[in-house]
Amino acid sequence: MTPTMPPDVPPGSRRLTPREARNRVLLYMAVVAIASWVLLPIFLIAVLSFTPREEFFGWPKPLIPSRFSIETMAFFVNSYGVLESTLNSIWVALLTIAITLVIAAPAGYALSRFVFRGREAFRLGILITRMFPTALLAVPLIVLYYRLGIYDTLVGVAFIHAAMALPFSVLITTSIFVGVSKELEEAAMTLGCSRLEAFVRITLPLALPGLAAAAMFTFVISWNEVFAAAVLTTQNRTLPAQVLANLRASQPYFKVAGGFFMTIPALIFIFLIRRYLIQMWGGAPAER
Amino acid sequence: MAEIRLENVWKVFGKVVAVRDVTLTIEDGEFLVLLGPSGCGKTTTLRCIAGLERVDGGRVFIGDRDVTELPPGKRDIGMVFQSYAVFPHMRVFDNIAFGLKMKRVPRAEIRRRVQNVAEMLGIEELLKRYPAQLSGGQRQRVAVARAIVLEPQVLLMDEPLSNLDALIRLQVRAELKRLHKQIGSTTVYVTHDQVEALSLGDRIAVMKDGEIVQVDDPTTVYEHPADVFVGGFIGNPPMNFLPGELVAPKKDGFLVLKAAGHEIPLPETLSRALKEHVGRPVTVGIRAEHIEVLPKPEGDALPAQVLVVEPLGSHLLLTLDVGGQTLKVMVDTDLQVEPNREVGLRFDPAKLRFMDRETGKALLP
């Protein structure tokens, strides 16, 4: 420690000027407002899902239920079609991940490594798929799916989910491959690897955590997507489509439990990959 | 071991010509330094030898083989990158063994050769560590070990010292020189640091704008720069340049150099050699240490005024004004000078270098 510094004052503990103090208060107020906008519904829905049935309809509702009850959740999980559609959702999500990675990883690699004509146009163009609301595309999609014979199939749903996830996935994989130094690959090539071997032995292992994050992100997109899944299936429903179909006819506690049930995977995955998301988007301007 | 031959090599990126018609032969076992400012094409030239860039024209030979169309892995080269490019997900041992594994060398031999190289570079204690646990200097050694364990015919180094601290750099520089003596691979070394080039190279190839300006041993490059650019780029301080003119007095045939408002008679040999350039505007170059400073302007010495005195420890660096021109001069520390003082300058005309003022090219080889 330099002699000019007062000893042992942890950073940030010095007195703030009134202006700084005011700004900090405003900042924290904004943080609390935004966080509660997101967290409050999740909190309420979680509390209600584990509230005993009699308290659920009582008024005023207690903020914390008097006892922990899983009967609401159990009722939802055992409802007709829920288990089946959950399995469908998982299948669709896994298929979506496979399709997305097979396309997004090479695309991201190309965007990160090579300078080619139309590269910037491609980067922008890939976002076009997100320009049209799915509702607008619903009828043409249904017609197309009938013609191709993939209407009401899980593969069909996976295709449309992959189309939705691709723009982001390409963005993510690009930044992952940018993060793996080109010189590492070149070093491998001078040591006897072909370009493909260098990719498999060096780049892929280093990119793997990031690619896993991209896969989880894709999973969440597919798991949560409801509209396309609902219009493109009749029997083989995914979970959100199933819940949506039953929504009008069901009890409030069914809705609450269904809502919470569907939130869980997303919460877990976002929690696991948040480090990568912050890295990717927080650090994006620097590595353009 | 093998010689490297570049024949009329071109490399173009879009509209930028990075390497322009370079022809160069690097002899078997030689340590050649490619030296030049950033963007001069030295790294691109190295990458063309490595096969990391495809040449747009010309051919590359290593030994008797035309390697122009071969991928890097088939050229029998070892390369050390500026960032070291040590694989972060492998232990030091696996980093060094990587090339041997690719060549399917038996495991026992891999262990023996990695051990040997590690000892040669003093990193045998680090073999089980991951690169993240190493210092910059240690990583650099791993990168060198990985390149030389294959016993390549050609060793290529791209500014391998530029990411090291100044102190370690001095140490590693000497080690690299010793290592080259020991393994004897033909070595091409890219740097923008002229001190590194002078201290390491058997020969130095100075590049500018994608072309090789001069290839010579370090002393020649330093003492007889091929043009104004080389003289100004190499040496610290750079060579002094003064505009001048060569005139022939009426009778005796000896030439006189007119520069900085003075006339300097030239000796016989120089006069004869420069005869055909009489009347032409020239640029005269002289190194800072080749000028003698007298405490007083006396006799035939050129009068000059001291502008700045910079003590550099072993020497004094003076900035002088001579007839409106600025000169940098190195003198011994025992000379008593202070700013604004009038001093006299004397120099050996044999140390003067004459360049064409328009082209900048040296008039004498």
Image: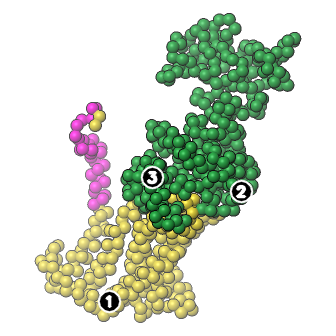
Chain colours: A yellow, B green
Where does the magenta region start and end?
A3-32
Q: Residue at x 66, y 36 (%)?
A: B217
Element assignment for label 1: helix
Q: Residue at x 24, y 74 (%)?
A: A44
Query: What's the distance in space between the residues labelled 3 and 2, CA to CA?
Result: 31 Å
Which secondary structure lies at badge 2?
loop
Q: Residue under mark 3: which chain is it in?
A: B
Mark 2–mark 1 distance (CA, rounded to whole Å): 73 Å
Q: Is residue A21 magenta?
A: yes
Q: Amino acid at mark 1?
A: Val
Query: What is the number of callouts on the image?
Result: 3
Chain of the residue displaying label 2 = B
Q: Nearer the viewer, residue B72 or B125?
A: B125
Label of residue B64 in the image: 2
Q: Residues within 10 Å of mark 2 (few under 14, many from 20)?
A: few
- Nearest to viewer (mark 1 / mark 3): 3
Image coords of residue B303 (percent x, y): 65, 10
Are dots 3 and 2 in contact, CB under 8 Å?
A: no
Give the quarter of the image for residue B331: top right
Check disc 3 and report the residue beneath it.
B118
Q: At 71% across and 51% down in the image, what residue appears?
A: B6
Residue A82: give its label: 1
- Depth order, front residue of A175/B166: B166
